[in-house]
């Protein structure tokens, strides 16, 4: 695949193999290449086990690529980076810390200026609609509220890149729809570069500027689909013929390459 000359994130020929518990060599990713521009929202969809989450971990520097490399701001990723925010499938909040204290955790770990961190945490909690819950504990929040805390925590240290690994997968359908709108509002406010993994084609199209579709294992890029739909977006967009055509096209790509299950 051709990559552009300038990009905020460059994934170039990334492959990943590992040894299974049976001692077998398994190839999870096979020569993944694509670029992400600064401030762009890119969704990644593909069958279960195709390496989507593995790719995010490689980009974050949590695990190494077996071949190829990732560049962020022109610099190779050689290990865990402090300038990346990561939102996981579960909020993984510390139950003994308040909402505000959970959001402040990266500020403490990275030893950033506390006053700036507190100001940014307050701004983020206001953006995600949780200012009145700053002194509550995770057990007092709904699943959607907990995930909003996780998003605020991932942004509090002002990362250059936000990685999101199926963050809404455990939510009910109505909460999930609400959270997609919340995420777009947050993205519009902060304009971070986002890579968003999901199993929902409609969610991928609704959120993204482009959708990277992947094949079944070993994961390869089937096609990068540009989503030429106007912003700002609301749920009514999902009922339009244009939206339906994108969803149908991506579903056909995935069905031809192994489906989503």
Image (cartoon, rainbow, N blue to C red):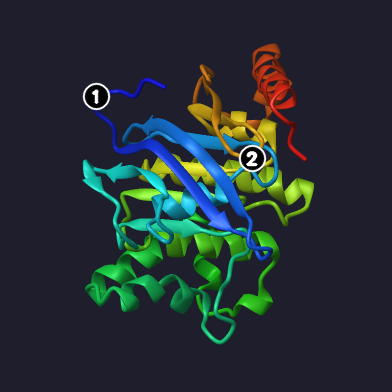
The spot of residue 4 in percent (x, y) is 30, 23
Circle 2 Cα neighbour tier, 10 Å, few/some/many (<14 / 14–19 / ≥20) = some
Cα–Cα span, label 2 and label 1: 29 Å
Q: Is 224 placed above or below 130 here?
A: above
Task: Please indicate whether residue 89 sits to the left or right of residue 184 in the image.
Answer: right
Can you tell which quarter of the image residue 38 is in?
Answer: top left
Q: Secondary structure at mark 2?
A: loop
The spot of residue 221 in percent (x, y) is 53, 29
The spot of residue 194 in percent (x, y) is 44, 42
Q: Is residue 98 or residue 41 the one in the foreground?
A: 41
Eye-nearest disc, 2 or 1: 2
Q: Which mark is residue 143?
A: none
Residue 122 in view here: yes
Q: Which mark is residue 217?
A: 2
Q: Is 132 placed above or below 171 here?
A: below
Q: Which mark is residue 5?
A: 1
Q: Earlier in the sequence, mark 2 or mark 1?
A: 1
Residue 126 in view here: no
Q: Secondary structure at mark 1?
A: loop
Residue, x 67% and y 21% (percent of image)? 253
Circle 1 Cα neighbour tier, 10 Å, few/some/many (<14 / 14–19 / ≥20) = few
């Amino acid at each position: 695949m051709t990559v552009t000359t300038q990009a905020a994130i460059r994934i170039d020929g990334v492959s990943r193999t590992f040894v299974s518990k049976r001692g077998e060599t398994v190839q999870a990713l096979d020569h993944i290449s694509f670029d992400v521009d600064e401030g762009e929202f890119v969704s990644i969809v593909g069958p279960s086990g195709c390496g989507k989450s593995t790719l995010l971990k490689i980009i974050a520097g949590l695990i190494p690529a077996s071949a190829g490399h990732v560049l962020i701001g022109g610099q190779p990723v050689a290990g865990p980076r402090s300038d990346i925010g990561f939102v996981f499938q579960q909020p993984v909040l510390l139950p003994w810390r308040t909402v505000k204290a959970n959001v402040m955790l990266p500020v403490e770990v990275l030893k950033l200026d506390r006053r700036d961190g507190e100001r940014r945490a307050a701004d983020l909690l206001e953006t995600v609609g949780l200012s009145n819950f700053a002194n509550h504990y995770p057990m007092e929040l709904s699943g959607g509220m907990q995930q909003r805390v996780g998003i605020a925590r991932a942004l509090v240290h002002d990362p250059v890149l936000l990685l999101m690994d199926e963050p809404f997968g455990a939510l009910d359908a109505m909460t999930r729809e609400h959270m997609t709108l919340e995420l777009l509002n947050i993205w519009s406010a902060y304009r971070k570069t986002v890579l968003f993994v999901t199993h929902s084609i409609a969610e991928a199209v609704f959120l993204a500027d482009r959708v990277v579709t992947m094949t079944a294992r070993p994961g390869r890029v089937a096609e990068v689909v540009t989503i030429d739909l106007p912003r700002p977006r609301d749920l009514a967009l999902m009922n339009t013929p244009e939206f339906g055509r994108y969803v149908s096209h991506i579903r056909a790509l995935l069905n031809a390459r192994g489906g989503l299950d």
